[in-house]
Amino acid sequence: MGECFVDVNGINLCYRIDGEGDPIVEIHGFGSKKESFMAQTPVLSKQFKVISFDNRGSGKSERPNTLYSMDMFADDLKGLLDYLKIKKTHIIGLSMGGMIALTFISKYPKQVNKLVLINTLTKLPNKFETMRTQNTNYNYSIGWKMLAGRGPIIYEQGGWINQTNGGRICIQILPKR
């Protein structure tokens, strides 16, 4: 499927769908666009219906001249999923996309099957210069102050799993239990 547009929360969002199967949404980071996952999408689309979209203010989506918030981005994703009639999905969030995904799962937990977070934070720290990367110390609750590491953190309903592979990013969708 080529690029499509949908009116969500008063703005036009650009999205595309590749493949068939259980849905998985890719959420890109700040200053990026849906093509951030162009290496992963062809592989994932062999087993999944992959939904890629440009967040408001990026790519081919509309750029309203207003302040943006994580709640706003999460609500845009909710609107897109509602439009596509997707009740439950896997989500991969990269960088700021992980922050959006965490906001989404805190607002709409029943719509998320599994969540993969790659190089993300739960919120922007007050002082960037004080941010440190802890490779082994993770706190697995929605109220964390910061999440940083070399590999993705994977959420499966009921728990979190830290996945690293020699510093390389590895994306894993866990089987249902």
Image (cartoon, helix red, strand yellow):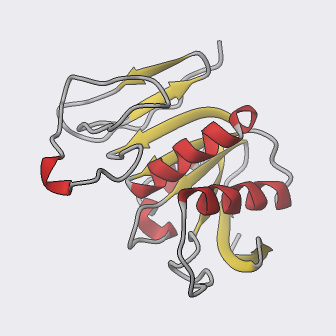
Residue shown at 41%/21% (left/top)? Answer: 161
Q: Is residue 161 left or right of residue 46?
A: left
Residue shown at 68%/63% (left/top)? Answer: 76
Q: Is residue 48 left or right of residue 92?
A: right
Q: Against 47, is 156 above or below?
A: above
Q: Against 23, is 176 above or below?
A: above
Front-most of 59 and 4?
59
Q: Quadrant of residue 96?
A: bottom left
Q: Against 14, is 64 above or below?
A: below
How many labels, in total? 0
Instruction: From the top left corner, tell me how far across and down residue 121 is, in percent.
Output: 36, 45
Q: Quadrant of residue 10?
A: bottom right
Residue shown at 41%/52% (left/top)? Answer: 94
Q: Is residue 55 left or right of residue 10?
A: left
Residue shown at 33%/37% (left/top)? Answer: 147
Instruction: From the top left corner, tell me how far across and down residue 85 is, in percent.
Output: 86, 52
Whether residue 90 is visible, yes or no, is: no
Instruction: From the top left corner, tell me how far across and down residue 82 is, in percent.
Output: 83, 55
Instruction: From the top left corner, tell me how far across and down residue 150 is, in percent.
Output: 23, 38
Whether residue 74 is visible, yes or no, is: yes
Quadrant containing the N terminus in the rendered view:
bottom right
Q: Against 140, is 27 above or below?
A: below
Q: Quadrant of residue 51?
A: bottom right
